[in-house]
Amino acid sequence: MAYKKVDKDDIAYLIGISAKNRVFFGQDIKEDYSHDEMPFYGKFIPEAVIEIADAKEAAAVMRYAYEHDIPVTPRGAGTGLCGGSVAVCGGIVMSMTGMNRILEIDENNLTVTVEPGVLLSDLKNTLAARGLMYPPDPGEKGASIGGNAMTNAGGMRALKYGVTRDYVRGMEIVLPDGNIVEAGGKTAKNSSGYSLKDIFVGSEGTLGIVTKLILKIIPAPDHFVSLLIPFGDTDSCISAVPDILKYKTVPTAVEFMQREVIEAAEKFLGRKFPHSASEAYLLLLYDGNSADELEKTYMDAAQICIDKGAEDALVADTPKKLEEIWGIRDVFLEAIKSSAAEMDECDVVVPVSGLAVFIKYINELRNIYQLRILCFGHAGDGNIHVYVCRDNLSDQSWKEKCGSVMNGLYGKSAELSGQVSGEHGIGHAKMQYLKGTSQESCIQLMRSIKAAFDPKNILNPGKIF
Ligand SMILES: Cc1cc2nc3c(=O)[nH]c(=O)nc-3n(C[C@H](O)[C@H](O)[C@H](O)COP(=O)(O)OP(=O)(O)OC[C@H]3O[C@@H](n4cnc5c(N)ncnc54)[C@H](O)[C@@H]3O)c2cc1C
């Protein structure tokens, strides 16, 4: 589709419906808006940026853009990892970070109503002060809740609590033609026709702009305990996971990590991890309201791991000890990024039973291509993050090797009945892999849904399929 270029009349309109200090064009557009956390996937400078103040403004922009065939790309905090918030077809970037109020904490219905630009860290801290918890826990706490909902972000606690989708009860949405709709609400159940809010969750800003969210919250558990479990080899480490999951109590998190990743994080932060001499590690988290019950659970889990060949089981049961471990776990991605000249990443998810085969395959790729390939991730739900590092390869060699490794990883995941993305989304960077591993009829259905919401294809074009 041929889109209209943004001109001075369009800028005048944007300023007219908002404010001069919230509309940017030409040299005034910050470089940050041209990429997300993976500039490796290309930089695309938008023609204009508007910082949105409320739903009415967002609707006015959409009505105008729809009428004039100007593409609009919604953007949260820009922490995405697949280029979802980048204006690949030009046009306007609509920044939602200024809409950052927590509107209501409803303790009777156990819901919180927020604007989309509220940061995950702010929501968590506000709720924690009242003994409440919003369970989804993606690694990047500087992400916005709107971005989390639009990517259906996962994170460490997905194993016990589920992902963002499970906590979105309702949304206010500005449609591509500027109409405002409400999908879902505060109710705990809803069997009233198609679940529109579930169509919007994970739609990566291609179907509508979320301007308000109603989220489910829970009373925060009182006790948290982690176990750091070193293994001499990756195989026995991964083979312990199904046994841990089959045991009576579902862990809050089961994370997998290799020594090389821990070493990169130690170097990045300039501090030591409590243990880093072993080849592979599981990091378990349990939470609950009874210290005694929790103790029995983690002692049993430790024994399961020892029976599977673990070298030790280190208990972290105080806030200080928990921070010593999780503070390092939280910077893995940044640490790997800073250790490599360039890197590509893959966020596939496979059935848990296929995890051992998948990780073995990563090691084979490492040997075949002689590349530094690091991985860590959410072993409890089969979602592994793989990072292919460039180091000192020539442009040509890097391009060829990285491409072959990525094809191999997505191919193996499909063979194991996995999915292209467990939590980061498709954006524009993973489109070829979604197409390559999906049924054509499913892609066609997605296209029909997109056309029903956005017949002119002006909202975040060039994404997903
Ligand atoms: C260090 C690090 C760790 C991470 N760990 C995790 C993790 O554990 N789990 C995980 O799932 N992700 C993780 N991520 C990825 C990222 O944080 C998530 O994808 C997050 O949900 C993006 O939120 P954002 O506000 O930055 O959105 P953006 O990157 O700005 O946008 C993401 C997508 O949402 C759309 N969008 C944003 N706001 C709106 C809105 N209001 N209305 C409509 N569409 C909108 C955009 O168009 C885009 O398609 C990590 C990223 C980093 C850098």
Image (cartoon, rainbow, N blue to C red):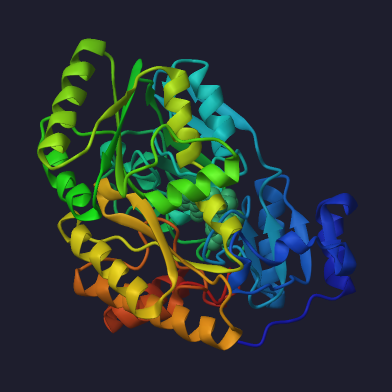
Q: Residue at x 24, y 65 (%)?
A: 360
Count all numbered tags in the image, as a single digit.
0
Q: Is residue 187 visible?
A: yes
Q: Residue at x 16, y 45 (%)?
A: 240
Residue 141 rendering spot, x and y as whole percentages:
54, 40
Q: Nearer the viewer, residue 290 or 84?
A: 290
Which quarter of the figure is the C terminus placed in?
bottom left
- In-front residue for pair 381/254: 254
Please determine whether, in this image, residue 309 is positioned above or below residue 32: above
Taking the image as shown, residue 388 lies to the left or right of residue 41, namely: left
Residue extending furthest toward the front: 277
Classify 294 as above or below 111: above
Give the x, y percent position of residue 192.
29, 47
Q: Is residue 254 left or right of residue 397?
A: left
Q: Tell me: 291 left or right of 64.
A: left
Residue displayed at 56% across by 88% down: 396
Residue at figure coordinates x 87%, y 72% from the top left: 9
- In the depicted structure, whether residue 404 falls above or below residue 59: below
Picture coordinates of residue 52, whole percent (x, y): 72, 50
Res. 254 in view: no
Locate residue 428, reporting x and y percent: 52, 73
Q: Nearer the viewer, residue 306 or 182?
A: 306
Quadrant where the image shows the N terminus:
bottom right
Q: Quadrant of residue 325?
A: top left
